[in-house]
Image: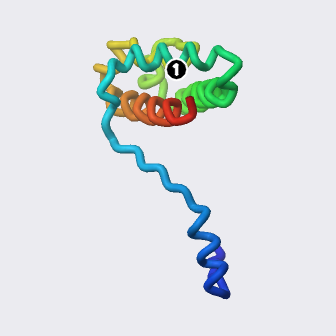
Amino acid sequence: MPVYTPSTTSETESLTSTMDVIYFNNEFPREDLQALFRRLHNLSKGRQHPILAQFLNEATWAIKSEILSLPSELKQLIPPFTTILSWAEATELREGLICGAVDGVLLVVAQLAAYIG
């Protein structure tokens, strides 16, 4: 991987002045997760939030794609779903053998979707 070294101070200043950093912690929001996901789902159906809708569709597709690569004994643990947001209501999934992975996915989706929406 090439390393970029700015040649002048002004190049360094222009790079750092346009950088935005967003920090997400590793905790779920304080509010009810199911209510948050319902609200995000409803927002994604409106015309005002096409990027949120696209994100949720692509996140769902990515998770379904990852599930296809799992061993069959793990695939059987995941019930069919139409959207990743439905995992918030799947108690057996969130308390089962792969609960850590499921909660990790839900946390990232909740944080990014809330930021986008």
* 51 or 87: nearer the viewer: 51
Local crowd at mark 1 within 10 Å, few (<14), some, or many (≥20)? many
Q: In which quarter of the image is the C terminus?
A: top right
Q: Position of residue 46 (x, y in %)?
A: 66, 15
Q: Where is residue 28 in the image (x, y as percent from the top left)?
A: 33, 31
Q: Is residue 16 above or below residue 36?
A: below
Total labels: the figure holds 1
* 58 or 116: nearer the viewer: 116
* Residue at 58 percent of width and 18 percent of height: 43
* 103 or 98: nearer the viewer: 103
Q: Is residue 34 left or right of residue 8?
A: left
Residue on which disc 1 sits:
40
**Amino acid type assigned to the residue bearing label 1 in the image:** Leu
Is any part of residue 68 visible from this angle?
Answer: no
Q: Is residue 7 above or below residue 68?
A: below
Q: Where is residue 14 in the image (x, y as percent from the top left)?
A: 64, 72
Which image quadrant for residue 48?
top right
Which image quadrant for residue 77?
top left
Q: In which quarter of the image is the N terminus?
A: bottom right
Q: Where is residue 24 in the image (x, y as percent from the top left)?
A: 40, 44
* Residue at 39 percent of width and 13 percent of height: 90
* 54 or 102: nearer the viewer: 54
Q: Is mark 1 on a helix, strand or loop?
A: helix
Q: Is residue 50 left or right of residue 104?
A: right
* Residue at 49 percent of width and 30 percent of height: 114
Is any part of residue 62 visible from this angle?
Answer: yes
